[in-house]
Every structure is written in C-alpha cells, then in structure tokens.
Amino acid sequence: MDDSKKRYDNTKSSLDEGLIINTIMNNSHDTIYFKDIKSIFLLSSKAHAMQFGFENPLDIVGKSDFDFFPDSFARQAYEDEQNIIFSGEPLIGRVEKWEKPDGTTTWLSASKHPLFDYDGKIIGTWGTSRDITPLKRAEEELAKVNQKLVKVNRKLEELSVIDSLSGLYNHRHFYEELKKTFDLYIRQKQKGNTNSFSVAFLDIDNFKSINDTYGHLVGDLAIKHIADIMIKHTRSIDGCFRYGGDEFAIILSDTNLEVAKGIAEKLRKIIESSPVFLEDMTVLITVSIGVACYSESDSMKDLIQKTDDKLYQSKNEGRNKVS
C-alpha cells in the first residue's frame, strides 16, 4: 500500500459523518439547511440561524420560511421546493431579494436540491444561500455610472453635431444627413417611388460689411436671427444647418423644385422684413438663396454643386433673391 493510500485511510478512520456535518454546519459562511417534504426545517447551519437572529441552530428546526420571510417570498420558496420534490431537478443560483422587517434589503444567491434517503427516495430538499448584497450594490452603482456615461456620451454626440453659435446642426452633420437622405431616395426610386427632395443654400448678403460697420456682435446676432427664422418657418421633416461662416443649408424632404423654391422664397421675405435690433441700432438683413432638386442630379456631389451654382446665380443677379 502506498503512502498516499495510507494517509487517506488514516484520515478517513479519524473522521465520521457526524464530525464532518458538524464542522460544515458550524463554520460555513454560506447558509445551509435541510427541509422535509412539507418544507419544514430539519437542520440548520449556524450561519442560517444567525441570518434570522438566532445563536442556536436548533431554534430553526420545526419552523418554515413563513416564520421568517414575507408571505410572497416564503410562498415562492415553497413552490420552488415542491417543484424540486416533484421533478427531482435542482434549482441553481437563483438571485433572490429579501426585504427585511427593519426595512433593509438583502440579496441572496440561492441553490436548492432534492434530498434523498438511502433508497434514493426524495424525502425533502436541502439548500444553500450566499449573501451577495455587496455585489448587487456594486452592480447598482456601476449601472448608475453607466447611465451617467450614456447621458454624457449622448450630450457629447449632440455637441459634436451642433453649431454652438446658431444652435443649428453643423457642416459635418449636414453631409451625414444628406448622404442618408440621398441613399433613402435612391432606394425609394428603385422601388418605383417618384418622390424627390431638395437642398437650399442661404448666404447672408454683404455679411462682411455688416461686421465691419456694426461689429461682430451684430454679425453674431444676425446668424442667430436667421437660424431662429429657419427653424420656425421650415417643416418638422426638414433639416436646418449652419454650413459655415454666413452660409446656411436646408434639406427639404419630399419636395420638387417648385415647392422647394416656394419655401425658400417665404424664408427670404421673412428675413428681409425682420431686421436685427441692438440697443439703438436697426440692421436690415437679406439673404441670397440657391435651390436644387435631387431628381435633377446625378449624384450627391452633383446636387451640392448645382445648389451652390444657384446660390451664386442669386448673388450675381443682385442678391436678395431665390434661384
């Protein structure tokens, strides 16, 4: 017989089942319990008893979960144990929330198993549970942090596409949205839909002169003023952008060229009749507008070029007009 076998036999001879059970039941930090077929406690570990405020585990024997837990919790435990007795299948690692009478909450990770006699007959259940409250609190704190990060990231994303002066979407977002819109209408066209959309470019007339004459503060007010008018007097399905400097852009959904130019002309007239006021100054502002339609363009680049050409046509023909 080798040394390892001798050591095993010597150790086994010095232990009995009672000593093993007593050691585990008195020293395990996890709660351990045994129940009969009616879910009455037959045996309780010290940690299990202390969970309910008892020093002596024998004080638990003969009682049930209904003596310690809220009815809903105890009823669920009873149903689980009856299912285990009926099916012979264990329940492993269920996370349970225990609302204590003192108002505190404890989270438990519980596992339950069928209890067999020596003949293999199920005579009850046995189970263990571990207090995972610190882990759950850490998870909740992490979830809160993640929610804050999501909000911050969403805000950063918004800021990355918003022009800080005008409050409109910026140049980068214009191209992102234009590509989405262009791709959408291409797909619709392939399905036989003849709808179109248009793009309008707006440019403040003589903006450099406004800055030179009245100062950059008035120039900034002019940009904000036009942005407000664009938002107020375009449709909810349209997109308004500050293209850069004193230039603006609008994506006009579901419009042909005639409808789009009508919207642009309405904006031109409102801007013309709405001066900017600063203290004792009244500054008249006009815009030149160019409009082009998707249905008359070969590509997104071509659409932008056509719109730009129309804008410069308006400026070259005297400004304060729509082309």
Image (cartoon, grey):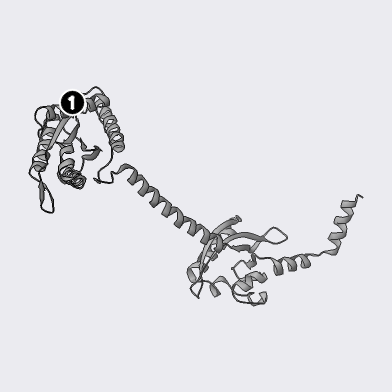
- Give neighbour class at mark 1: few <14, some 14-19, many 20+ (Cα, 10 Å): some
In terms of depth relative to the viewer, which is nearer, 281 or 184?
Answer: 281
Q: Is residue 120 visible?
A: yes
Reply above or below: 294 against 235.
Answer: above
Reply above or below: 11 against 316.
Answer: below
- Measured as percent of width and height from the top left, residue 233 is found at 14, 44
Q: Taking 266 as reference, is 105 left or right? A: right
| Residue 254 image-quadrant placement | top left
Q: Is residue 190 visible?
A: no
In terms of depth relative to the viewer, which is nearer, 197 or 32?
Answer: 197
| Residue 199 image-quadrant placement | top left
In terms of depth relative to the viewer, which is nearer, 81 or 23?
Answer: 23
- Residue at the spot x=84%, y=60% of the render? 12
The three-letter amino acid code for the residue at tag 1 is Asp
Instruction: List the residue tagged with mark 1.
Output: 309
Q: Taking 199 as reference, is 54 left or right? A: right
- Residue at the spot x=55%, y=60% of the render? 135
- Residue at the spot x=48%, y=59% of the render? 141
- Measured as percent of width and height from the top left, residue 40 is found at 60, 71
Dot 1: element: helix
